[in-house]
Image (cartoon, grey):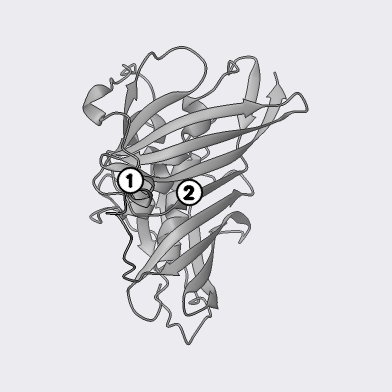
Amino acid sequence: MTASAADHRGTERGACDRQAGYAPALFVEESDGCVRPTEWSRGPWSLEWLHGGPVASLLAHAVESVALAGDDWFTSRLTVEFERPAPVDLLRWSSEIVRAGRRVSIVDATVTNAASGVVLARGRAVRLRKADVQLPLDDGVLGPLLELEPAPSQPGDGHEIERPASRPVAFHSAAIEQRFVGETGRPGPIFDWIRARVPLLADREMTPLQRVAAAVDQASGISAVLPADTHGFINPDLTVHLFRPPRGEWIGMFSTTHHHTEGTAMTETAIFDVEGRIGSSNQSLVLTAR
C-alpha cells in the first residue's frame, strides 16, 4: 500500500483471494494487503498460532508500505502490541500516516483476522527525516564518546544448537539461524546472532527494519531464567529503538530478563550488526506459574 503525505488515509483493502503454491517465506501474499501464514511462521506455544517475530515483521512491512514525501526517512522506533494470538489463517494488514510532520512522521499499522476483522496486533512507528549533520569526531574529548559501540562478537564466534530433525517446522526452529556466543543451556543473559533463512514474502528481500523486528522477539526465550515447565512468560508487546539501520543479514542481541514477584517481568536487549551497535529493544512479560 502507498499513500502520499497529502493523503493520510489508509488504502482500502479488497477481498483476500487465495493463490495456490508458494516459495519458502513467512507469508504468502494472496492479494493487496492480504497474506496467508506458512508453517515457517508458527510459534513455540502452539502450531495453530504464529510466533511474534513474523507478526512484528509484517507490521514493519505495513509501516514501510506507506509513502512519505521524499525517501529520506528513517524508522527510529517501532512499537508492537500483540492484542490476541494470531492464527495460522488468512490475515489482513493496513497502515496509515497519522502525523506527517516536516521532521517527524508517525505511522499506525494493524494486522487483523481477514474473516472476522478482529484486530490481532497493532504497530506504531516513529520516522525521522534524515539530514546531513556533521559530528565532531576529531574532537579529543567528544570524539571517543561519538564513536560507534563495537559488536562484542561476530557470528563466526557463535555456535548453533542442534535441533531434532523430527521437530515440526516453525519460525524459531527453522526460519531463522541462531549463533549463540558463550555457554548455552543455562538460565540468564546471553548473546545471540540471528539471521533469517526465509524472507517475509516470497521473492522479496527483507528490509533492515523487517530483519530487526523478526529477530528481537526472541529475547524472552533466549534470556529466560525461569524454566518453561514451571512458569509461563509471554510478551504482550515489543518496542524497538534504532539510531541507524543494520547492515548485512546478521542481527546480534545481548538480552537480559528482569523479574518481579507480582507476576511481571521485562526483557532488555542491546542490538548490533557486525559493525557495531544499532539500537535496543524491550518486552513486557506476563509471568504465570504452571
Q: Is residue 44 visible?
A: no
Find numbered disc 1 in the image and state the secondary structure of the residue it sits on: loop
In the picture, the quarter occupied by the C terminus is top right
Q: CA distance from mark 1 to mark 2?
A: 30 Å
Residue 75 x/y as whole percent: 43, 61
Q: Quadrant of residue 99?
A: bottom right
Above or below, comparing residue 232 to residue 13 in the picture: above
Residue wearing tag 1: 148
Three-letter code, disc 1:
Leu
Q: Is residue 121 visible?
A: yes
- The number of callouts visible is 2
Q: Residue at 53%, 69% (x, y): give it.
A: 106
Q: Any mark on residue 55, and which?
A: 2
Dot 1 and dot 2 residues touching (CB under 8 Å): no
Is 274 left or right of 26, judged from the image as shown?
left
Q: Residue at 49%, 85% (x, y): give it.
A: 7
Residue 180 x/y as whole percent: 34, 23
Q: Residue at 47%, 87% (x, y): give it.
A: 6
